Image (cartoon, rainbow, N blue to C red):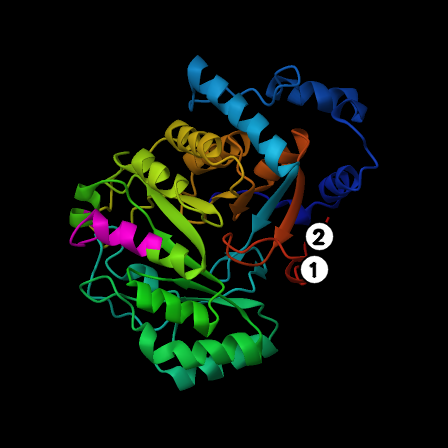
Amino acid sequence: MPNVSYFWYEPTYYQRIKLFCQEKVPALHTYPRDWAQKHVHLFSRGRGPHVRNNSPHRVGEADRELFNQAWRVARDHHGNEVTFYLPGMIRYGNLRGLYPAISLTGDRCELLCEHCKGLLLKPMIPVTTPEALVDKCETLARSGRVGVLLSGGSDREGRLPWEMFYNAISTIKYEIGLFISIHSGFLDRSTAKSLKEAGVDQALIDIMGDEETARDIYHLDGLRTVINTLENLVSAGIAVVPHIVAGLMYGRMQGEYEALRTIARLRTASLVIVVLTPLKGTPMWGVSPPSPAEIGGLIASARLMMPRVPISLGCERPRTEEGQAMEELAIQAGVTRMAVWSRKTVDLAVSLGLRPRFQPTCCSVPYREDFSKRFPISL
């Protein structure tokens, strides 16, 4: 994580944002003159923010126009709110989200995708039987958790052992009362329908756009497995939140725009874009992820292709100078959600007239006031 000062530790900064978001300050020009002058380079005469070009992460003229168009579309369809999320697996200062991830297979995975090799399961809570899952969720609910992300390793076909957990999921949803997200894995129509009937609120699934990535990175039979799963989930009536991992082909952008086109033709609840974060112990270790400009361009294109869909910059991304630039460009490219934020990014959002709000869940979860008010950060 970068050495940043998080805004809730600075009362004067916090009060300035709170004042703005309560509409006691009606417009940017009412701020002190020196503060407005400091940020004037971010604006393009009422058409949205200029993309900053005073950093090493420069974008061209055509990209700046793309960003401006995306900004206008975002404001037209989503207003001025932007929601910042803190997932349950991530600690931010002395705060932690209220939405833990649970692995139904412990640390076991047979698929062993090239970018993960099962390592992403290790921070999750290991629970491998239905009875233990219900017990754990009862404990989590009593401690104030608002929901859970059910995940786990896959078999060689990309499937999770959902069948043995249907009754437990129903108990968690309808008796314990937690919001339920799942990492669905790759599944058939019958399984999708059963998960919907069990009470799953939303399904998260990685979508790639080319055969090479599906076969060589995810070790699947082919891209058709991915598209069939996406269609099965949508057909079952589950709120589907596709994730695009930018740079999966060893840091190169390859099928991401085709993935956008696949997602755009279906009715999905939202879209999350994350960025390859090379993990030590995987073949990806040491590769460079895509540049901030590439990530910003992907987000801006997604916004124009799916103007009404909430779009998030997800929690998996570099925690470096480049990662900070990705956050700033994502705001300017029209995201409506972001997982794990820095003070600098919230500052930028406010300076552009956006109204930040905060929620202690995965960024796939729609904003809910009853969830947000349990979080010690409020505006």
Q: Residues within 10 Å of mark 2 (few under 14, many from 20)?
A: some
The Cα–Cα distance between marks 1 and 2, rounded to whole angstroms, is 7 Å
Closest to the observer, 63 or 282: 63
Q: What type is the residue that disc 1 sits on?
A: Lys
The answer to whether 39 is drawn above or below residue 234 in the figure is above
Q: Per the image, is 226 magenta?
A: yes
Q: What type is the residue that disc 2 sits on?
A: Ser
Q: Is residue 16 left or right of residue 364?
A: right
> Looking at the image, which residue sits at the far right?
24
The answer to whether 350 is drawn above or below residue 56 in the figure is below
Which of disc 2 and disc 1 is earlier in sequence? 1
Residue 127 visible at all: no
Residue 34 visible at all: yes
Determine contact: label 1, label 2, CB under 8 Å.
Answer: yes
At x 59% / y 23%, what residue is drawn?
49
Q: Which mark is residue 301?
A: none
Query: At which x and y percent is residue 180?
Result: 49, 67
Q: Which mark is residue 373?
A: 1
Q: Which residue is mark 2?
A: 378
Q: Residues within 10 Å of mark 1 (few under 14, many from 20)?
A: few
Q: Is residue 347 left or right of residue 219?
A: right
Q: Secondary structure at mark 1?
A: loop
Query: At which x and y percent is residue 251?
Result: 27, 37
The region drawn magenta spans 217-231
Query: At which x and y percent is residue 154?
Result: 25, 65
At x 56% / y 19%, what residue is drawn?
50
Q: Quadrant of residue 376?
A: bottom right
At x 54% / y 22%, what residue is drawn?
68
Closest to the observer, 53 or 373: 373
